[in-house]
Image (tube, helix red, strand yellow):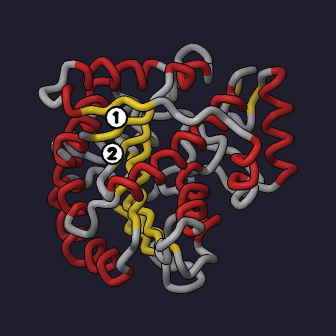
Amino acid sequence: MLPVIYSPEFLDHQTGSYHPERPERLTAIVQSLKTAEFAQKIQWLSPTPVNPQLMSWIEMAHSPNYIHKLARIASQGGYLDGDTPISPRSYDVALLAVSAWLDGINQVLIEKNPAFVLARPPGHHAESSMGMGFCLLSNAAISALYALKQPGINRVAILDWDVHHGNGTQSIVEGYREIAYCSLHQYPAYPGTGKATENGFHQNVLNLPLSPGSDINDYQPLWKSQILPFLKSFNPDILIISAGYDAVENDPLASIRLQPEDFGLFTQYCLGVTRKILFGLEGGYDLESLSKSVRSTMAACL
């Protein structure tokens, strides 16, 4: 069985007409999974309701001033930046998304097998004191810091295969020698970070920029020569994947040419590092390609 943590409340983060990060992303994935050949092997789980303790984990990654600002803007509806609209329910939904990611960590550590968090809003662009790029709270970074506080967890790796560099995740975790961060991303592209020379404070960051037009033939050598050696040498007790699917050829926001089945191959590579993997949804804006890519990931896990 593959635990999938999901709530219809994640649809309540409203971004307005024509915004690419829209509720239909989740509904398309859910509909696709319910007709997948492995549908009976999915264990649908609801996230733990938001509780007061959750804020202590969020504050490990985000400043109280930013959290208050996010709540204030959301209460009236508005924008964190020009790309990031939020609505009156967005703050509560973002908290629930963090709760879902932490539930995912717990599931992986208990079962010692993969789990998938099907939540929005995404998080890897959210920095300590600023939300941006459709992202409100840094789900992957918070999850990594939470995981380090669990018994028997001494090292956490984050792999970010979203087509955009996770500037927020990197900025939050690169000061921790117990956390490794690896990102494959189109460059140049939003947000302009993620140069190969950015290696973290403890040589714990590996950035692999790819040129527009790159495809699986460009990705595979990087997996074999750099990504897998980096992850295996770090030897993480748990692997968190910022699972963005906007590197597919049909995605409207980037120019990488992966195919949905390529993410199944990436997943197989990761399972060769550890089966203790948490996948959490980040980007991906072509609904059909997004759904197929998620299915490929889950099929490889099963």
Residue sitting at 54 percent across and 49 percent down? 102
Quarter occupied by the N terminus: top left
For the residue carrying disc 2, how many other residues have a C-alpha within 10 Å: few (<14), some (14-19), or many (20+)?
many
Label for residue 46?
none
Tell me the residue at 43%/45% (across/down): 280
Q: Which mark is residue 247?
A: 2
The residue pinned by badge 1 equals 251
**In the rendered structure, which amino acid carries the disc numbered 1?**
Asp
Q: For the C terminus, which image quadrant? A: top left
Is residue 35 something that shows in the picture? Answer: yes
Please say if 12 is above or below 300: above
Question: Tag 1, which secondary structure?
Answer: loop
Q: Position of residue 275 (x, y in %)?
A: 27, 60
| Residue 121 in the image, given as x and y percentages of width and height | 57, 35
| Residue at the far left in the pictured view | 37
Locate residue 217: give its quadrant: bottom left
Q: Secondary structure at mark 2?
A: loop
Residue toward you, 204 or 133: 204
Question: Callout 1: few (<14), some (14-19), or many (20+) C-alpha neighbours within 10 Å?
Answer: many
Taking the image as drawn, is residue 180 in sight? no
Q: Are marks 2 and 1 in contact (CB under 8 Å)?
A: yes
Identify residue type, mark 2: Ala
